[in-house]
Image (spheres, rainbow, N blue to C red):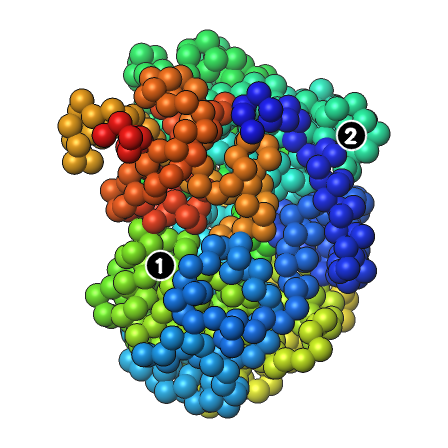
Amino acid sequence: MSIDETPNTGGGIPVIRYWAEKTVSPDGVKIWQKLLHKSACLSCAWGTGGQKGSFVNEEGEILQRCAKSVEAIASELQPATDFDEKYTLEELQELTSQSANNLGRLTHPLILRAGSNRYAKISWNEVYDLAEKAFKKPAQRIASYSSGRSSNEAAFLLQLMVRSLGSNNLADCSDLCHAASTVGLKQMFGSGTSMVSLASLKGADCLVLIGSNAPANHPRLLNELIKLRDRGGKVIIINPTIEVGLVKFASPAFPIRSMLTGGSPISSLYLQPVPGSDVALFVGIQKSAIEQNLVKFDFLQNYSENWQSIVQQAQITSWETITSTCGISQAEITIAAQIIGTSSAVVFAWAMGVTQQENGVDNIFSIANTALLTGNVGKPGAGTMPIRGHSNVQGFGSMGVTVNLKQEIQQALEQLFERPLSRVPGYDTRALITAAERANVDTLFCLGGNLYAANPDLKQAQRALGQIETIFYVATKPNLGHFHGLAQQNTIILPVFTRFENPHKTTTESGNNFVRLNEPGKTHLRQGNLISEVELITQIAQRVLGEHPVNWRQLQNPKYIRQLIAKTIPGYEKIGEIDRTEEEFTIAGRIFEQPQFATPTGKAKMFVTTLPKLNLPTKTDFGVAESTPGIMLILGTGRSYSQHNTVVYQPGDYYRGMSHRNCILINCQDGEAARFSEHQRVTVQGDAGKLTDVEVIFGQIRQGAAMMFYPEVNAIFRAKIDQHSGTPAYKRVPVFVYSENNQ
């Protein structure tokens, strides 16, 4: 497929066709049973489902399930896997992410012992014996890693157990994605989550969407953008790549108006900055707002601190510096500032395109500074809105699964424990990899996720994990980490129920701070030996810790976990009564519709942001002469349309014209400059390795930029790290692209 053959509208008929195919498939009935189950969607953190109904959001609106939700459910409805009997380790290591996922559901505990080339079944008693030994290692040599599909209850138990052992090594997948958002917003507003609820979003007349491919990763958001445009509002898109669905989108939730008319317009203004230059762009918007008299000085004086420094920086920074850094013209920046400054209520939303940068926290500061300068925080329909990935990744942070524990939670836990918590700083995800590589970790407990594939420099990740004595992987299906992220002695895979199979009620938290209650369910697996995550963690904790500092056996009933959460987690007080009331709720203290913030002074604190110096490495940095044919590009990692984090459901990307995973999306002018023809095969060289036989695809991406799919491309680079948040810069990776035939 070429760029001329790609669709001009996102969503639409392909989505309907996918739903229809799944409905008439052999698993169609089971899929619809799970779709109708009263539990939160398994996919993104935009969230839907729960007590109001599986297709209903927190505002009572219907038709709020997307194709990604169906993909996730269908994947969990696979039959039981027997890969341990069929395949050697060497054969498993040849699998792709998609083929690993397609092996089926895990039904028995499995172990790979040192020296063996096959996984083998073991009993739960053996698991607990191994766990008891592994978790009695010195506290600082014990660590955990987690993802966001588990429940709040499992997350709370995980951090409770790890901190009870005396460790703060609670790495989480959010360290690799939205940590910059949490760190930046916490410093500015006293809360690290979205200050915009779904109800508040419906009052916006402008939305600025930065570094997000929402049509693929958060399709439900497009419903809100369509409605915003229908009521006369504006949508500004900031993304180096023109994504089809951000230009026009046909939503199945609007079947007559949107589907039958060929889609609804999304973007009012589409800006394609140089990757990593977002600070320069937003300082430019600030400068233009000042020049157009659009700054709300009364608001700044009353409700913010240090605003004078931000105004001064924008004033003294030259337009030449701004435009040369971000690659956006002064005229375009002026239009953006005018739209923002003359709108009555603006929401600033973003995803990993700005957080996964070396200056990720500064990016968040610059976005929030712009919101404050234009008076677009602390009122309905306006504010900052990070768009989270995993369905309950934000819930994990709320439950204290973080190395940056809130003081209020720390004090509450110390009261519960009747002793101080350890003050030794914990390992975030990148620090965990570094510590493991140095042989400083003995035991690792992974509650979901794919720690191996989610990291940059996969050889380093493999090497680091190989230094750990015992690794426990809690999962519903196999993934690449189970075959490549192998422990030194024992690699143990522990099968658990998925969200809609748990024998007890659980809760989850959406990215907009809404807590959902999930009903119990049943598994389709007729044979197996699965348990819930709650039972697993409490069993291990009871074995290792006895009855201290809590009654772990009692906590096998999640009702009692929720009572502890209510006592220890700020804003979660209502969860203590949710079993009786069944009342889902918005977490208190996070939605700022008045300009009173959760800071010591009640005012927002503003921070000066430094414009990045974005130098492109030379060919000699990659060990070749400058005369060598080929081209230097700035690569950003991305997901395909049918992908959720590191899990690939289908190989290609229909909307980008990329029919398989080993492609590179580049601008046609870059292709011509390098004398590449479309569909030619090239080599992509990073600072940690290279990928060969990569197909060139021409697309609507900014000149000088490129995009490839992760996790596969993670193998070739060592990402730079944002020193404030620990997040790797996956979205600005220098690469040298060349044809082996021309060398």
- Residue 259 visible in this rendered orientation of the protein: yes
Which mark sits nearer the N-terminus, 1 or 2? 2
Which of the 4 quarters of the picture holds residue 187?
top left
Q: Position of residue 231 (x, y in %)?
A: 74, 23
Residue nearest the viewer, comparing 342 with 353: 353
* Residue pointed to by mark 2: 259
Front: mark 1 or 2:
2
Q: Quadrant of the N terminus?
A: top right
Spot the residue most to the front: 741
Q: Is residue 672 left or right of residue 22?
A: left
* Dot 1 crowding, Cα within 10 Å, few <14, some 14–19, many 20+: many
Q: Residue 585 carries which label?
A: none
Q: Residue at x 63, y 80 (%)?
A: 528
Vertical placement of residue 277 versus 71, above or below: above
Vertical placement of residue 557 versus 730, above or below: below
* Dot 2 crowding, Cα within 10 Å, few <14, some 14–19, many 20+: some
Q: Where is residue 163 in the image (x, y as percent from the top left)?
A: 40, 73
Secondary structure at numbered mark 2: helix
Q: Which amino acid does label 2 sit on?
A: Met
Vertical placement of residue 322 versus 10, above or below: above
Q: Where is residue 258 in the image (x, y as percent from the top left)?
A: 77, 28
Q: Which mark is residue 428?
A: 1
Q: Which residue is drawn at 25% across and 24% down?
A: 629
Residue nearest the viewer, comparing 443 with 596: 443
Q: Between marks 1 and 2, how big is the CA–CA gap?
A: 44 Å
